[in-house]
Amino acid sequence: MTQIEYARKNILTSIMKKISSQESLSGEVFLKRLKEGKIVIPLNHKHKIKKPCAVGLGLKTKINANIGTSPDKDSSSDELEKLAVALKYGADTVMDLSVGSDIPGVRRRILKASCVPVGTVPIYEIAVNAQKKYKDLLRFDINSILDCLETQASDGVDFFTIHCGVTKKSLDALNSSKRLMGIVSRGGAMIASWIKKNKKENPFYEYFDRILDIAYRYDVTLSLGDGLRPGSIFDATDNAQICELKILGELKARANKRNVQVIIEGPGHVPLDQIRENILLEKKICRGAPFYVLGPLVTDIAPGYDHITSAIGAAMAAGYGADFLCYVTPSEHLRHPSAEDVREGVIASRIAAHAADIVKGLPQALEWDRKMSLARKKRDWQKQIKLAIDPQKAKLYRLSSKPDLSDVCTMCGKYCSIKLSEKCLKL
Amino acid sequence: MTQIEYARKNILTSIMKKISSQESLSGEVFLKRLKEGKIVIPLNHKHKIKKPCAVGLGLKTKINANIGTSPDKDSSSDELEKLAVALKYGADTVMDLSVGSDIPGVRRRILKASCVPVGTVPIYEIAVNAQKKYKDLLRFDINSILDCLETQASDGVDFFTIHCGVTKKSLDALNSSKRLMGIVSRGGAMIASWIKKNKKENPFYEYFDRILDIAYRYDVTLSLGDGLRPGSIFDATDNAQICELKILGELKARANKRNVQVIIEGPGHVPLDQIRENILLEKKICRGAPFYVLGPLVTDIAPGYDHITSAIGAAMAAGYGADFLCYVTPSEHLRHPSAEDVREGVIASRIAAHAADIVKGLPQALEWDRKMSLARKKRDWQKQIKLAIDPQKAKLYRLSSKPDLSDVCTMCGKYCSIKLSEKCLKL
């Protein structure tokens, strides 16, 4: 049975108990939301991990770190190092997006080494296999798709991104949308090209029920991908994007009916003033399904700093109700990320998630800020460093610049406003 | 005559012509907003600079970089290096916040070397002088205040932060506000301590007309400081903050009547869901005066990354109408910033400003993103690098990770979504 199925039978499983208590949510509310598909637990029956998590309404905003090989950067040990960095700095889940030479090998190593849920995008392995075998990455069919899903599920993958919303219909909407950037999703471009080449419907859409069979058997959560997400702020919230979202909303209902858990993926590149609308639309169209956003990046002009452009968008998105943030690293649009890029991406994403958790009213989030403010007021530097999101960096900064007086910092020295307030104002 | 006085006589000065044309705003609209105090030109008669700017409604969001010595970091050449970095990376103004040993010397060197407007916080020099002379930083009076303002104005300072809203009344509001962090503004703490010690009203408030005399003579823009800004998200938008803002609103009207230009300073530490309210309140209470925000930082827990916590808040604030962003560096709350911290702070702040300019509908901002998206679609790497907010970093990333195929990047290599779309979908 899947977690949603247990919930529907009103059975609070041990994993539900553990997670709801960590999240300070009553078992009853947790069960109700799981039942309605507003909360998911991405956890394959076959994957034993120390830090499972749930994603959805009323929970801490989760963040995901993408890792994985590419044709140009094809070292599994590099990816395992990035996994370690992502875990150290607090990623709640990781996705293996490998498109290098040994996809199954890398995946299995990541699954084994990860203490958090692991996701994949199976179309990558399917296309890379086709490329290897036939020198044509589009030469695949429903059988090779199902074979790949079965293998990955039996390996223990906890969630799959499935681009089932790229259909003849949504591609018609794309054609009439007159986009600046076209399709920027790798999986989305593969499926769209397959549809055009074969003049057939997207097999992930056409055979969705057979995909559900596999997902159900292993309790793999389906993350319904946004293959038509905007890749430029000019393409945000257009007909193509909304048409795809509506298809995902229908498929979400079908999957939940079959006791398969679902997450919805979202943009992308979105200007500040369209972020709220994007979240509200998803929540309405997909009946409260957990929303997993990539960024959104609020401008296109800052390659090298897209962890910042996306932290801005992600904080707003999560503040308005997005549940799950896919990190973006400083290397986005420029190169395959390094371990240092992963570190910067995870931290920026956690800052965004935490800023949102404050306005989501999560008691643990508020308590963290309260403790930090108190340590700051007391000028207790050890405590400030300990409480910092990255104690190592905070310590390094503090030690690099020693003040003459030990209870202040080198910014103001003896003119410290907090010290002055304490001394003269008894504040 | 001051710029606002010229505007009131319907005289479009050469500087107004130059700036309004750069900003693609008609002279007529520019003049009207200058007249109403919704736009300011911070430019001392005595300061000749190559890059003057205006701040306010309908203009590009401006960003300020703070530099200046401290008792522990007291090198004027370090500060001149930071000035050069701030200018190179695009600061629209700088503020010299020195509290080291030779405040006038540092200020004069910065004024001479800067091609953009320079601001100061005169209370720092006043208090540091009192500390030197009497070993009591609070031993100053209206005469030493006016002397300092006169000297700084005649040196050519373009805008002064004046903490005239910290009064007996706003301190009463502070006492009843039961704040977590008290006063975190250095100038605010000095004035509040002075009021308490002397049991007299704030001389910057009491003798505001005499300050206006000096500001008027040199056309120094007054930036009315928020000495009671929140220093923790728990203190945001409280009675003390709003009480002070109302006082600033009254003083803004008085200053404008005397043909002195005014900017209003704002928070600080503010949770995501109070940012909009903060901007709307300032715009209402201060009748559209340009709003200059420090951050706001949307969480307290990320020392080492406060350029990111503040870029999130600043983008939102400017998106809702803030006009002027004071940068925050990664060293905030930890140490006196290094030149590298200045670089990171300026860029994060410019990203926030630009993201807001997109939703403010500024044609030049939109055009920049459009060009970048087109270069990305064409996989024109040279153009992408040239258009990047920091071409040096973008180039470094690109060169550090060379792809096998020159028209893609190492993230996806031959599986590039844009290349696939072009080839198979003719997008």
Image (tube, coloured by chain):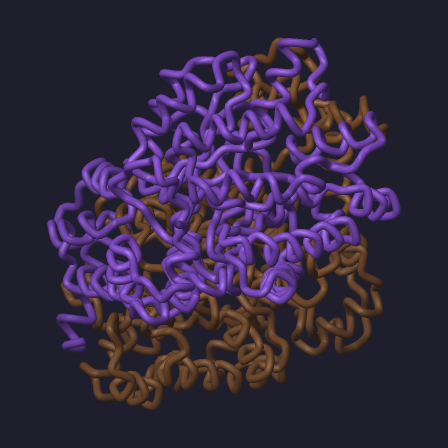
Chain colours: A brown, B purple
Q: In which quarter of the image is the N terminus of chain A?
A: bottom right
Q: Residue at x 62, y 82 (%)?
A: A287
Instruction: Work out whether A398 lies above or below B167.
Output: above
Along the line of sight, which residue is nearer the eye, A40 or B55? B55
Along the line of sight, which residue is nearer the eye, B14 or A245? B14
Residue B45 in picture, x, y percent from top left: 36, 40
* Snapshot quadrant of residue A377: top right
Q: In which quarter of the image is the C terminus of chain A?
A: top right
Residue B210 in picture, x, y percent from top left: 60, 39
The residue most toward the right is B176
Q: Residue at x 57, y 77 (%)?
A: A280
Residue B305 in picture, x, y percent from top left: 52, 38
Instruction: Work out whether A252 lies above or below B248.
Output: below
Residue A17 in picture, x, y percent from top left: 80, 58
Query: Going by the image, does B193 lie left or right of B188?
Result: right
Query: Going by the image, does A244 lie left or right of A19?
Result: left
Instruction: Work out whether B248 lies above or below B213.
Output: below
The answer to whether residue A128 shows anywhere in this view is no
Query: Going by the image, does B322 lie left or right of A35?
Result: left
Numbered circles on residues, count: 0
Q: Which residue is drawn at 70% across and 61% down?
A: A360
Along the line of sight, which residue is nearer the eye, A14 or A36? A36
The answer to whether residue B341 shows anywhere in this view is yes
